Amino acid sequence: MLPSQSGGSDSFTAFAFRALNLVAQGLVEVGRRPSIKELRFFIEGGAESLLIRAMECHAGRVDPQWRDSADDFFKRAQEGKIKKMETITQPKDLAVVEYYRKVLSNTDKGSEGIDGLLSLVEHNRMHFSKMIASLIPVLNMLTSGELGGLLSPDETNVSDMRPIFDTSTIISGKHVIYIGLDSLSDAIVSSAIGSIVLADFASVAGAIYNSGIKPGRISMFVDEAAEVVNVPFIQILNKGRGAGFQVVMATQTLPDLIARTGDEAKARQIIGNCNNLITLRIKDGDTQKFVVETFGKTYIKTVQQSIGASMNSGDNLAHFSGNTGQSLTYGEYDLFPQHLLGHLPNFHYIAAIAGGRVIKGRLPIITQ
């Protein structure tokens, strides 16, 4: 969902991710399930109220009588002896922040998530707005209209009878989920949603791998993969088999993946992590070259024959001589000629299967 890590945007991407992560940790501290709507609300409007609530909840967990311990801080705040912050000015809120900072922070009773959220709130608002400028439009798109209620359902709305699923529930319940992203209409939103879903499945795959309890084979089909691939998807390709994932990825050309990832090496890494390569007709030369490299080389036997005849000099025309010859040579050639990849008929394919097999075949045409 975050901007591409190309063109010098690494620092912006890292900052936006940190902001999202800290707000999500704050929501968990107060016992609320992070959603895109909630993330947008606190990223766009400021996380001050979330910070205060998170500090109060955390303090209540480590010391149920913390308000008695913080009484002196509340008195000092009412007397104006605690310096106001840029975005926090209410005395009771200042007292909570000061109590946490002086008593709980940097101790075994503190929270790294709250410490990070505090630093986020104290960050210069002007600079903060500039660093997340590319994140806000995406959050707005994912929370506007019907999409907002679909991606960020309200669990407290008893009138909404639609079931709420997450990826772990889908896998454990052996359900089938089909997500039509409609990238032709809106490539930005579809790419963001696809990236979020893949990242969530990668997280679940990691949990399954760590627990060692496999729910069985999990089949994942990603069509037009160049629209949604990201680092978590590479991790699924690379390590997902240990969690029972079987992934089928379909894409058009290698340059599509390079344009998405911004790096040819990463694009090759994506395809290189696939055990089987099945290709239909390809028009792009770079993709043809990559596929031919995957198929490898072979030795072809060439037989050359020669026949010669000559007339002897003299008056006797019956005198002549002749010769025949044959030579056998071996040459190294591409197993499948590159140019033929652009001339495969409809439904014809060539595939490199795990184990070293290369197959030339045709998909059956089913008729009634």
Image (cartoon, grey):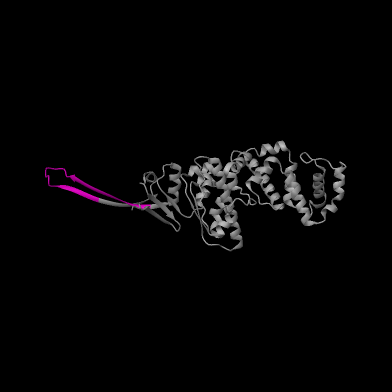
Residue drawn at x 61%, y 39% as measured from the top left: 137
Residue at 70 percent of width and 53 percent of height? 31
Image quarter where the N terminus lies is top right
- Taking 317 as reference, is 172 left or right? right
Residue 325, image x and y in percent?
26, 51
Residue at 87% in and 45% down: 76
Image quadrant assignment for residue 8: top right
Q: Where is residue 66 in the image (x, y as percent from the top left)?
A: 82, 54
Which residue is more in the foreground, 72 or 112? 72
Task: Answer left or right for 104 relative to 296.
Answer: right
| Prevailing SS of the magenta stretch | strand
Where, by quadrant of the figure, is residue 287 drawn? top left
Q: Identify the residue at image location x=75%, y=46%.
A: 118
Q: Can residue 335 be seen in this view?
A: no
Nearer to me, 59 or 214: 59
Counting every numbered tag in the picture gives 0
Q: Nearer the viewer, residue 52 or 14?
A: 52
Whether 139 is among the magenta residues is: no
Question: Percent x, y for residue 290?
Answer: 46, 47
Image location (x, y in percent) of residue 203: 60, 54
Q: For the view shown, which residue lies furthest in the bottom direction?
A: 213
Q: What stretch is highlighted in magenta?
A: 299-324
**Residue 348 shows up from this direction:** yes
Q: Does the magenta stretch include residue 310?
A: yes
